[in-house]
Image: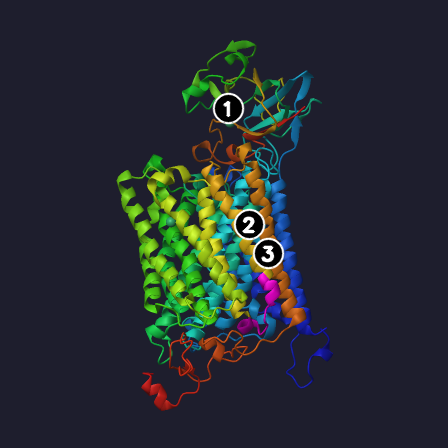
Amino acid sequence: MSAAAIPAAGPVREPWWRGLGRFNVFTGIVLGIGGYLIGALVIGHVLSKGIPAQTETNQNDIEFVCGILLGIVGFLVGMGFLNYPIARLTGAAPTLREKEEKGIARYFTLCTDHKVVGIQYLWGVLFFFLVAGLNAMLIRTQLLYPTEHFWSADNYITLVGLHGTMMMMMTTSMVLGPFGNYFVPVMVGAKRMAFPRIEALSFWLLPVAGVVLLAAVGAKGFPTGWTGYANLSVQAKLGMDCYLISFALIGISMALVGFNMLVTVYTMRAPGMTWTRLPIFVWSVIATAFLQLLAAPVLIAGMSLVLLDRVVGTTFFMPFSGGSPFLYENLFWFFGHPEVYILALPGFGLVLEILPVFSRKPLWGYRLAVAGLMGVALLSFFVWQHHLFVSGINPDLRPFFMFTTELISIPTALVFLNAMGTLFRGKIRFSVPMLFALALFFNFFIGGASGVFLSDAPSDVSTHGSFFVMAHFHYTIMGGLVFAFFGGLFYWFPKMFGVHLNEKLGKLQFWLFFIFFNLTFFPLFAVGMLGQPRRVSAYSPSLQWLNDWVTAAAYMIGLSFAVFVVNVVYSCFFERRRPEANPWHSKGIEWQLPTPIPVDNFERVPVINASPYEYGTPEAPLVANLNPSHAEVVAAGG
Amino acid sequence: MSARRLGALLAAVLVVGGGVAIGLYVALFLEASPPPVQAAVIGRRVAALELQTVAEVGHGENSFWVSYYARTPGHKWVHSTILRVPAYSLVHVTVYQYDSATGLRNPLWGQPRGVVGGVMYVNGKPVKVLNPELASHTFAIPELGVSVPLPGVDEEAPNQCSNAPCTLAEAHNTITFTFRTRGPGKYRWQCFVPCAAGFIFGFGGPMQSIGYMDGELEVQSS
Ligand SMILES: [Cu+2]
Ligand SMILES: [Cu+2]
């Protein structure tokens, strides 16, 4: 970093180490560690004195939880999240924006620019995905042999729980985090999100949750898998506290994102951006935001109650004094089922956004698509007990939940219908984003069809808790959401980074991923039908060849992600192909703006003149008038 | 190299380094396991195992925890529950029981099962069923159908053991029995008495920990 590299005329840059003394992630880490130590060694120590269940078992949940909670507070203070509230309390004038750093430094601070938050989310999500994906490779390694194992059963279940929880936590923000934050304000013609600081907070809770969850490994692990069922969780080791706190943090983050997105779309649309001109991706964000806002608090409650059972000795889930494990199962799945649609819906929205661009046709059945997304969102609150068919619930409830669950295939099918209608007689370009988008429909069809067997109480009895379930939800989440995510990433990468990802490497990644994804998870339906349970590493020796096949294919999925990493490095640092202003010839507003998008997105409030899907209509106006006259603004209702 | 490139490189190194560090961290956790203890081979397809159960380890990280110990063929007591035995063999087990009675949740487990002759010997006397209230721990290998209740020592007995491994001079019961192994593989074994003092229902800590009340039988082809 020589002085010569800095242009003489430019502003004098401060040395990099100055940043350490300010409010940023480094300060946050230091205060976080300090907070942990004070919480555990002082507050927790005092609070747990004289409680033998805490002090005489070498499992002092009070100390540990106090440490983590204070550590989180310390981190947020160090990040500077309290600066503004304190300034306001002491009479400072309101501002919409924190003092923002320049260059790479702003990615390590509380930044209120929604585009910076989007990119923070992107790398955060990818890092989570990498770690949880490596865990998946380890799981498959353990399953190479039916009875001979590399690691003990206890450690294996922690590994499975770590993979599952990390993936479920990360995927809740996989699309909404990077693309929602980056593009929703742009797509509705706004200059920012409604609550920029809350937006920053929702991101920074994600790495905190990641670190807390990983700490479970150092705290002897947790034996519950990603669902954390009580009362096993109440009796589990210290690592369980990490699971509970980190999942609750993700719940808070989700609720904040949902709230922020809803208010942004409702209140900050540009003049002329009517509900029927809203990009379908934004509609899917609205549907998801509703789910997040309504479901996440139930998760936070569930996690907090288990934490209370463990730490202060309440008995919400302990039958011997009137508690009930069913309470947990209901709380968890009342969140958990909507969560699977929190994962699925943004994926649907994303591919429906991509399809018209690459088939040069308007989105077929726009209103139907909106109805489908909203229908799924609404119905998803009425199906949660299909996870409990074999748990001993009142059998009379089964038909109702069977019915509602099967009902949900109708709005889901609408989305398929929109896609097929859009593709019909389109001028299809098989670019990388389009390949990923098309693959979603193939994968999700298999995922959805296999779901019918699980929603049917009679057949669920034999498939529940087996690899059949596991194959089913990997087909929907990985085959759906993760494919959509990569489609969106290839589609918007030129806009976000001003670099075009290499198409050849992209296609290589796609085909490796698509082929080996199916070769991995399709056989797992058979494995499950033949009786192999989830979360257990011992299985019948007769299933070894199928398991070994799956493991080999899973390694190849890992290879496809390695191709992606190579692609990013190669495209960004070696090839550096500058994209055209609008490489996919999309009508989306985001492509009308310069790259990189300026801090305020729009110089003046734009006026929206058309829907973004009017492909094939030569006389259609540009979607946004970026420089409208006063009369045009008034005419558009602004 | 420009500051920008250097920054990017630094970030890349940090990400890769972070990934590798997390990978190592998880891998070390997975590998963590007490050392395996080999059973003594005392004949063709016959092996002998010596174990002891103690009320409190008495020292180290989890000094309050109840635990099993195992003895190597070199007569050294090791804090481990990973037991290596030959396949398709008879295994003579001797358990020195130093802990007092907790009682069985299920009286059915008062009967030694899956052992040769359906009988165990307590201080040399054959026992076909144990009063459930006298049991302190069980030695059970579910996959082999083995389940043996271990009678606790009298709480009033003089010379109680307080620091593991305990010696024969301290108050104890000696239980012997024989079971048969099947083919090679890892078999889970554990105690089924919720004996973890201080934990909810006695099911926490040591009951969930390999090296304490939980273990693995590594059956190896001989
Ligand atoms: Cu569900
Ligand atoms: Cu025991």
Q: Left or right of A634: which side holds B99?
A: right
Say which residue label 3 marks.
A560
Figure label count: 3
Closer to us: A258 or B168? A258
Q: Is residue A2 magenta?
A: no
Q: Residue at x 50, y 53 (%)?
A: A167
Label number found at residue A558? none
User: Is A602 drawn above or below residue A396 in the view shown?
Assistant: below
Label number found at residue B137? 1
Label the magenta part by its dominant secondary structure: helix
Closer to us: A540 or B212? A540
Q: From the image, state whether disc 1 or disc 3 is nearer to you.
A: 3
Q: Secondary structure at mark 1?
A: strand
Between the residue at mark 2 and the residue at mark 3, the CA separation in whole angstroms equals: 29 Å
Circles 2 and 1: CB distance less than 8 Å? no
Looking at the rendering, in which quadrant would you find the C terminus of chain B?
top right
Q: From the image, state whether disc 2 or disc 3 is nearer to you.
A: 3
Looking at the rendering, in which quadrant would you find the N terminus of chain B?
bottom right
The magenta stretch spans which residues? A494-507
Label number found at residue A215? 2
Tag 1, which chain? B
